[in-house]
Structures are given as structure tokens and as C-alpha cells.
């Protein structure tokens, strides 16, 4: 079944639509046009809650899992998503999304290797994203939707991000242990002391 995926900024403004094909069991969807993937991912990084608009005019609110490189993504019924959000506990007053150890270790590795945090968003208690950039053009972005984390990388000169699991199929290895193989250290810049010989 075909539908349009829209993101509602408020009662009068929506962003999209992204035409999608929905699976028979309504648990998955796929973008018709992969050229719109990064636009969808950008909005998704701010908030994973969208509206499906069907040809007959009916709508259904859903949470959308992080869109994969081929434009496919999981659809989560809004009531189930709300129940997960309600069950989440939030300690303290910090507005940052709580990060499990693997995410904290990955963030530390990125910062130690020249990346800076450029954007940080939060969409509810269990959803959010963070974008990192480095001076040589590398970008890294991780996202969390209802407690499930994903990592995407974009090398210098590329507009599109690639999902980590496509770059490194062994999902048992922690991200921060694999990143040196995929990214490496930033290029070294010479200092005045290096040039005096």
C-alpha cells in the first residue's frame, strides 16, 4: 500500500511528504525515492514521530525507526511508542539523552580524534540524535529511537551517510573499537617547531 509520510511541526505546518510503500503487515515502509533519504534522516534526527497519510485521506501517527541506507524503516504504532516513552525513567534534570556505555565510549573516541559535536537533539525520553564533524570533512551521526541506537558515517566529500552495520557487519564489536579501521586519525598539521630543522 502507498502512503505519504509527513512530519507535523504544528497544527498548520507539515514537512514532507515522503512517498512510501508500506508492507502488508504495516510494520515496515520503504521510500519511493532514495534521493530524499537524507532529508528524511535530518528531520528524523529531531523527532522520530510522523504521520502516514493514505490516498483515501485517513491518517495514522507512527514512530519511525532510523531509515536504513536502502530507504527501509520500521513503523511503530504511536500507542506502543507512547507506552515505551511512559515506562522510561528519567533521573535528574539533564536534558541530554542518557547514553549507554558504548555510546559514551564512541563519543569519547570521536572527541579524542578531532571531532566536535555540532548538533544535539532530543525527541522524548528515549529518542534523539547527535552529529559530529571533523576538520577534514568526516561526519558521524548517531541516533536513538525508543532506546535503539544506530551509527552512521559520511566520509569527506560525501553528502549521504552510510549505516555502520553496512560498513562493519560484525555487530558484536563495539563501535569505538572499529572506528580506527574506518576513519583513522585526522591529518597532522605541521607546527613551527616541525618546520625548523
Image (cartoon, rainbow, N blue to C red):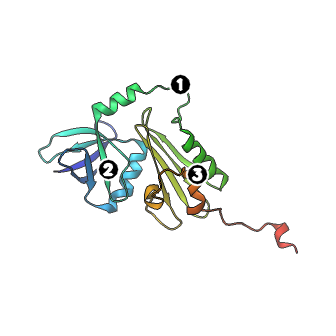
The answer to whether 108 is drawn above or below residue 89 in the figure is: below
Mark linked to residue 174: none
Disc 3 target residue: 176
Disc 2 target residue: 73
Residue drawn at 56 percent across, 30 percent down: 94
Q: Position of residue 162 (x, y in %)?
A: 44, 60
> Which numbered disc flags the more N-terminal residue, 1 or 2?
2
Disc 1 target residue: 91
Residue nearest the viewer, comparing 89 with 52: 89
**Marks 1 and 2 in Cβ contact (< 8 Å):** no
- Tell which residue pokes out farthest to the left in this image: 56
**Marks 3 and 2 in Cβ contact (< 8 Å):** no
**What number of labels is visible?**
3
Kindly state the secondary structure of the residue where label 1 is placed: loop
> Which numbered disc flags the more N-terminal residue, 1 or 3?
1
Kindly state the secondary structure of the residue where label 3 is placed: helix
Amino acid at each position: 500500500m502507498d502512503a505519504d509520510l509527513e512530519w507535523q511541526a504544528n497544527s498548520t505546518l507539515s514537512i514532507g511528504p515522503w512517498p512510501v510503500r508500506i508492507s502488508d503487515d504495516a510494520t515496515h515502509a520503504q521510500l519511493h525515492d532514495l534521493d530524499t533519504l537524507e532529508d528524511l534522516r535530518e528531520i528524523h534526527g529531531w523527532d522520530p514521530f510522523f504521520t502516514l497519510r493514505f490516498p483515501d485521506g485517513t491518517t495514522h501517527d507512527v514512530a519511525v525507526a532510523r531509515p536504513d541506507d536502502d530507504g527501509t524503516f520500521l513503523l511503530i504504532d504511536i500507542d506502543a511508542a507512547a507506552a515505551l516513552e511512559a515506562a522510561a525513567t528519567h533521573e535528574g534534570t539533564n536534558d541530554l539523552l542518557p547514553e549507554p556505555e558504548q555510546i559514551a565510549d564512541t563519543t569519547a573516541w570521536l572527541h579524542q580524534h578531532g571531532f566536535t559535536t555540532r548538533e544535539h537533539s532530543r525527541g522524548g525520553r528515549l529518542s534523539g540524535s547527535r552529529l559530529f564533524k571533523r576538520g577534514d570533512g568526516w561526519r558521524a551521526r548517531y541516533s536513538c529511537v525508543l532506546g535503539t541506537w544506530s551509527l552512521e558515517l559520511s566520509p569527506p566529500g560525501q553528502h549521504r551517510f552510510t549505516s555502520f552495520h553496512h560498513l562493519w557487519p560484525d555487530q558484536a564489536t563495539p563501535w569505538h573499537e572499529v572506528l580506527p579501521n574506518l576513519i583513522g586519525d585526522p591529518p597532522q598539521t605541521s607546527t613551527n617547531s616541525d618546520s625548523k630543522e
